Image: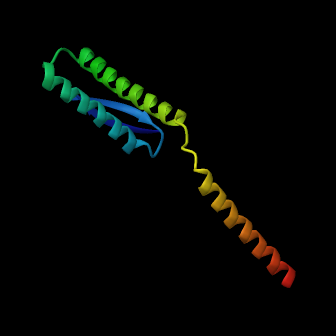
Amino acid sequence: MAQVTIRINGYAYTVGCEDGQEPHLTRMAAEIEQRITSIKAIGGQSGEARLLMLAALLLADELHDMRQTAAAQAEAPVPAKPDGERRARLRRVAARAEEIAADMLDA
């Protein structure tokens, strides 16, 4: 098991992770640090626990929005092809099947 030291809000934390996951863990810590920096820019420092809680809420809100978007996209109906387009495709497939069958008879 690998260990990575990450810095969040000026504090160093040593965190264990699976081998090879170190860069991913570092990127996640950078995401949290980015949220904390933006919170501090808006309202100043208000304690380590509060900053981490607000950063967690921001991340949870983003995750919630992404899940809603993904669910809406999954439920969106697939636009149906016009009947004319389906018929034309079916004719092309049928013609190709007949060509293949004719080639097999000639062989």
In the drawing, does residue 28 fall left or right of residue 41? right
Whole-percent x, y for residue 35 in the image? 25, 29
Q: In which quarter of the image is residue 8?
A: top left
In the drawing, does residue 41 fall left or right of residue 105? left
Q: Determine if residue 107 is in view.
A: no
Q: Residue furthest front?
A: 84
Q: How many numbered markers are drawn?
A: 0
Q: State which quarter of the image contains the C terminus.
A: bottom right
Query: Between residues 38 and 68, which one lies in front from this camera angle?
Result: 68
Q: In which quarter of the image is residue 27?
A: top left
Residue at the location (61% across, 55% down)? 84
6 versus 46 height, above or below: below
Residue at the location (33% across, 20% down)? 57
Residue at the location (40% across, 37% down)? 3
45 versus 102 height, above or below: above
In the drawing, does residue 54 fall left or right of residue 68? left
Whole-percent x, y for residue 31 in the image? 30, 34
Query: Between residues 8 and 34, which one lies in front from this camera angle?
Result: 34
Query: Between residues 19 and 31, which one lies in front from this camera angle?
Result: 31
Q: Which colour scheme is used?
A: rainbow
Residue at the location (69% across, 64% down)? 91
63 versus 24 height, above or below: above
Query: Between residues 64 and 20, which one lies in front from this camera angle?
Result: 64
Q: In which quarter of the image is residue 44?
A: top left
In the drawing, does residue 12 fall left or right of residue 64? left
Q: Residue furthest bottom?
A: 107
Q: Determine if residue 90 is in view.
A: yes
Whole-percent x, y for residue 58 in the image? 31, 24
